[in-house]
Amino acid sequence: MASSKDTKQDQLAASLNDLFTNVSDMIKGELQGTNNVLELLEKMNVRVGEEYNGFGDVASGLRVFVEQLKSKSCTFDDYVQQLDAIEQHVTEFEAVISMLDKYVSQLESKMQSVYQIPPALK
């Protein structure tokens, strides 16, 4: 019976050894999978970092461009103010012309009434 007991113990030891080997392989596989995911994540982070560096360069260029546009627009502000002043003067001038036109029409009417000029002969 001793040999049967030894055989069962050997089988148990072999089964346990297989179990531990399989569990160890499974854990190694899980760790390798996790390691692969982390390596992929690291590569993705490097790639995204490179993209953002490019965006930083573009943003810096845009900032310079906007500053140039602002400096140019400041020179246009003077012209816009001059155009606004001219527009105001033209509006006032149109009002004066309208008043003069009415005055001339009244004078014309008075002259016609004084000299009895028929309106058709204008």
Image: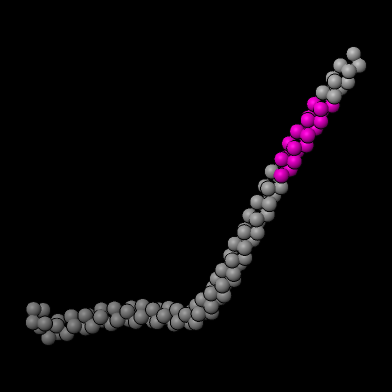
- The mark tally for this picture is 0
Q: Residue at x 29, y 81 (%)?
A: 97
Across and down, in percent, residue 90 comes to: 36, 80
Q: Is residue 28 left or right of residue 53?
A: right
Q: Position of residue 54 (x, y in %)?
A: 59, 66
Of residue 94 and residue 112, the one placed in the foreground of this image is 94
Above or below, 12 against 115 in this view is: above
The answer to which of 66 and 98 lies nearer the viewer is 66
Position of the C terminus by quadrant = bottom left
* Residue 15 colored in magenta in the image: yes
Left/right of residue 76 with respect to residue 5 in the rendered view = left
Asked if residue 116 shows in the view, the reply is no
Say whether residue 68 is magenta. Answer: no
Q: Position of residue 113 (x, y in %)?
A: 14, 81
Q: Residue at x 51, y 76 (%)?
A: 69
For this rendering, which residue is in front, 76 or 100? 76
- Indicate left or right for 27 with 91 as reference: right
